[in-house]
Image (tube, rainbow, N blue to C red):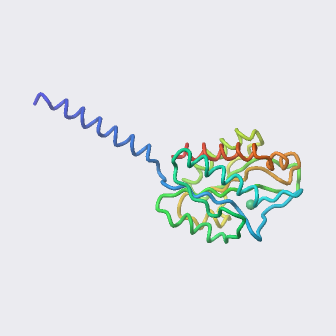
Amino acid sequence: MYHKPMISAFLSILMLLACASTAFAGKYTTVVIDPGHGGRDRGAKWGGVSEAYLNLKVAKKVEALLKAKKIPVRLTRRSDVYLTLAQRAAVANRYKDAIFVSIHFNAHNNTSIKGVETFYASAKGKRIAANIQSRVSRHTKTRNRGIKYGMGFAVLNQTKCPAVLVECGFISNPYERRRCAQSWYQSLAARGIVEGIIKSR
Ligand SMILES: [Zn+2]
């Protein structure tokens, strides 16, 4: 059977192609972006800066970047409306293979605290959190506060898919608040989130 090596070589190539396409297709099909708070829930509010507003600004930038990469994306809210945490998780739970990224800004009574941190509640979420955290802290050049286990967050424990919650900066810190309120900072945070999402594919 002189052609046997050729057949096995052909099969090897087919298997390689199959693996490559699986890797390319990734482990999720839809990215659900959740801008935290909204409507009567303003989230953190410091020095005239509202977290709910910043969350939506970053979320829309993330959406635009993902669309440019042809990655299906869905926002839990597109305007200043109130959603319960269960409603937010329910959006993600409509999809079979989604990942869920909730976007927030942080605040603390100790106004010297600054930096970004990302929460997760599962092993898969932990990997996405690590990728998002490293990219966001790198781009925004603020303190990397690391990734943290956050099972207490309803949006993390009510979502069936891998879910993370990223805190893009402390608006209670005057220096960081001025940065967070700027469009360029929001763009850098969005870029970091998108790079982390893509790296997690
Ligand atoms: Zn928040």
Give the quadrant of the N terminus. top left
Residue at x 65% of width, y 67% of height: 154
Q: List x then y, in percent, for residue 20.
A: 39, 40
Q: Residue furthest top?
A: 2
Report whether 141 appears left or right of 193.
right
Q: State the image coordinates of residue 182 (x, y, percent, origin top left).
A: 79, 46
Q: Quadrant of residue 99?
A: bottom right
Observer-nearest of 102 and 128: 102
In the drawing, does residue 17 fall left or right of residue 182? left
Residue situated in front as seen by the camera: 160 or 152: 160
Q: Which of 110 and 175 is in front in this view?
A: 175
196 with respect to 81 (left or right): left
Number of disc labels: 0
Residue at screen point 48% across, 54% down: 29
Residue 139 place in picture, x, y as percent:
70, 39
Q: In which quadrant of the rendered view does residue 185 lie?
A: top right
The answer to whether residue 75 is left or right of residue 47 is left
Looking at the picture, how far across and down is residue 49, in whole percent? 84, 56
Q: Quadrant of residue 157?
A: bottom right
- Height in image: 60 above or below 4? below
**Rendering quadrant holding ligand 1:** bottom right
Q: Which residue is drawn at 67% across and 49% down?
A: 147
The residue that appears at 62% across and 56% down in the rendered structure is 101
